Image (cartoon, rainbow, N blue to C red):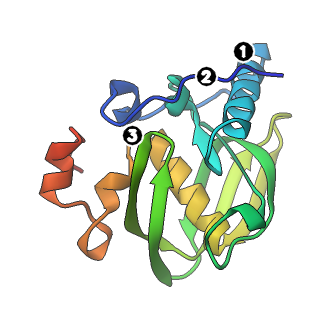
Amino acid sequence: MGKVLEIRKVGEPVLQKICDEVDVKNINEDILDIIDDLKTTLKFGNGCGIAAPQIGINKRIIVVGAKKEEVSYNDAEDIPITAMINPTWKELSKETDVQYEGCMSVPSIRGKVERYKNIELTYYNENGERIVKKVNNFFARLVQHECDHLDGIVFLQKVGNNGFATLDNIKKYNLRNL
């Protein structure tokens, strides 16, 4: 079992960096240890997903997982604990919705964010196998949120009119302007 690590908070430099890709042909013990730590930290946290920069690691790794009865989204589904290495996504339609989001790196703050409802997700699992799947609704929102962390983006940057942060939020939380 991994360790429960401290969640980095908004404004910390590691959350503002674009993460390095993982060499999927060389998924070694160090990468597997990071994944174990992410899983354990998520299990003992209060979120449905976590990205490596949230525990101070500049790698393109996320872990997601949720039980629908513990999620307040109407379209939530059970999502098994899943580690994703070098995840990417693309929208399958232009259909979006706006819902409140929260983040373990931004405690006690929620904001409305516009996200695509239907995406195609591509990632590598812990065995280095390439996975491609379609995900929708809450699962799609969760993946987009966590992938944003890998690009140095915190959801506050997307809060506001038409899904974009206001200048006040960017200044208030010392976020980089996109």
Residue 89 vertical position relative to residue 57 in the rendered view, above or below = below
Give x and y (percent) for residue 105. Answer: 45, 39
- For the point 42% across and 49% down, the residue is 108
Give the residue drawn at x 60%, y 56%.
143
- Mark 3 crowdedness (10 Å alpha carbons): few <14, some 14-19, many ≥20: some
Within-10-Å neighbours for mark 2: few <14, some 14–19, many 20+: some
* Type of the residue with mark 3: Gly
Q: Nearer the viewer, residue 164 or 127?
A: 164
Q: Is residue 34 left or right of residue 114?
A: right
Which label was assigned to residue 152? 3
Residue 120's quadrant in the figure? bottom right
Residue 127 in percent (x, y) is at 86, 34
Which residue: 18% across, 61% down?
Answer: 166
Point out the frontmost of discs 3 and 2. Answer: 2
Residue depth check, mark 2 versus mark 1: number of the one nearer the observer: 2
Quadrant hosting residue 122: bottom right
Q: What residue type is disc 1 on?
A: Asp
**Residue 3 placement (x, y as % from top left):** 72, 19
Q: Is residue 94 above or below residue 39?
A: below
Q: Secondary structure at mark 2?
A: loop
Q: Is residue 71 above or below residue 32?
A: below
In the rendered image, is residue 25 in sight? no
Mark 3 vs 1: CB contact within 8 A:
no
Q: Which residue is mark 2?
A: 5
- 61 or 78, nearer to the observer: 78
Sooner in the amino-acid sequence: mark 3 or mark 2: 2
Mark with earlier residue (3, 1): 1
In the picture provided, is 9 more to the left or to the right than 44?
left
Mark number for residue 30?
Answer: 1
The first of marks 2 and 1 along the sequence is: 2
Amino acid under label 2? Answer: Leu
